Amino acid sequence: MLTFESENLVVDWISFNITGCTDPEPIANYFSESFGFNSFLKETYKGKSEVLISEITNRYQVYFIKSTYNPEYNSYWNGITVSFSGQNAAYFYQKVKDGLVDWNVFDLEKTNLGRVDLKYFREKKSNDIYTSIDTDEKNVKLFMIKSYEKIVTKDKRKYAKWERNNKGLILRIGQRASDNYFRVYQNETSLKKGLSFELEIKNQTLLSFQEHFFSDQIEEFEKELAKYFYKQSLKAFRLDSCYTDWLSIGSRRVEKKYKNEVFVTSYFGDIDLSHKEEFFYRILQFLSFIRNLKNVKQFIGRQGYYTVDFKVAEFLTFIGEKKTNHYQKTKVLKFLEDIQDLNTITKSFSETGFRRSIVFPYLEVEKKAKHWVVSLSILEELYDYFYPFSFPKSFLSFNEKHELFIKYHLIKSFSTVNFEKVLSVESLINHFSLTNSKKKKFKELIIELISQLEKHDYIESRIRLVANVDEIIEISKLTSYKLGRAKSIILFENTTRNF
């Protein structure tokens, strides 16, 4: 499940609006005595602050704004806003998360979340490359320009502006009074240099999340708000930049919108490709199958494992094979035997020791009545792994070697961090010695499988056809003739599919 911690998101501002409140002192006393907050009172949003409570032992600050008019949002409202910023916000939110805040101090019937700022800090890396320009300053500027162009090209009514202030370059997206206001700015004076991506959420959008917040459903609150942060980021920023590598990976951790998706895979860099296509494909089928089975968790030392029980016939049904097919049963039993030889996983945990874990440490296959019954243990990390990619159910099975070969390479090209998926069609077609008629069917099968990905919104409708280095053509419909001219094609992952 997405959490602020798992996504490296920090609460950089949190405020509450208490309608009709005129005396903040009881709340200020509670914050001071319970959490060490000094309190300051402002009569207006831009007015001077006066000390409400100040104790020398208190380390944090909270502001109470007492006003009927907010010039920043051009709105009238009667009450008090309680605001925490920066490290004060992060500290207070942690207390909320730990269940230590007594909401009885507030009148919850009159209290709403006023504003939450979520910030992701992307630290500068030594290998950051955007273009041939060799300075980070120019690369950041170019990233902001291209993000600005994406926004105003897509919606001319959307406000966006980039500029330089006394702290460095900054990109602003949206009006300050709107539900969403994004800022991207340089952190060049801090100990860690990089870019901060900060989303300010308020008004009706924030109110849609607050039920989870005030009812102690913090896990759900963080999951939904993190998902919203990724959704707004995908709308705003270019993904062909080193500065959005975090977005490319993080947005794929969002829970799949379509619950019936059964065929999943990971980044190919995480997968051992030393085995043949069919064995590798069978592993993907098997991992997709067992992830939804009932399990029992056990430990060998400090390493967790899940044990699952199933019938071989159930696995055959899952992958579209006849459960009575003796040949397929024999192949599955041989596969189960072979997976015992998969590489162990080594985990370093100190300078003086290490731990090695077997992926499938236990396997028992027994014939009971007419059924082969399997009991198998699987490494906890592999069983619980959140697979970033999924494919249509039609990809779960294959009928012959050409279909397996094409599906394998489509999955391989798709399972990369980059949102542009490159498929080398020339090498695919030339891999087999085919007659012209069989070559035509082979190309038609490639087109059909790509069509299935588009039909189910895995990819966008546009395709780039690469004939040679100097000839790249964007097309909306792929044909056998066009495919035959191409060295490779580029497909575009649908980044908003799970939102």
Image (cartoon, grey):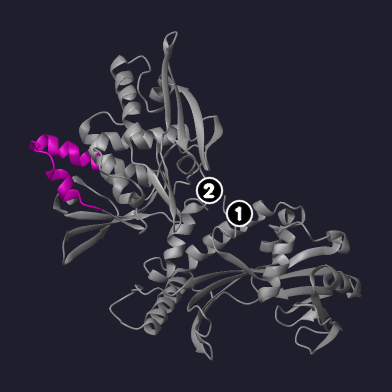
Q: Which residues are magenta?
A: 423-446
Q: Quadrant of residue 44?
A: bottom right
Name the amino acid type tagged 1: Lys
Q: Which mark is residue 255?
A: 2
Residue found farthest to the top: 369
Q: What residue is drawn where x is 30% and y is 19%?
A: 330
From the viewer's perspective, tell me whether residue 469 is left or right of residue 49. left
Give the image location of residue 417, x and y in percent: 37, 57
| Above or below, comparing residue 329 to residue 229 in the picture | above
Q: Which residue is mark 1?
A: 223
Instruction: Label 2: state its secondary structure.
Output: loop
Marks 1 and 2: CB-CB under 8 Å?
yes
| Quadrant in which residue 97 is drawn | bottom right
Under mark 2, the amino acid is: Glu
Q: Main secondary structure of the magenta part?
A: helix
Where is residue 343? Give x, y as percent: 33, 41
The answer to whether residue 104 is above or below residue 65 is above
Q: In the image, 66: left or right of 402?
A: right
Q: Between residue 118 and residue 59, name the one nearer to us.
A: 59
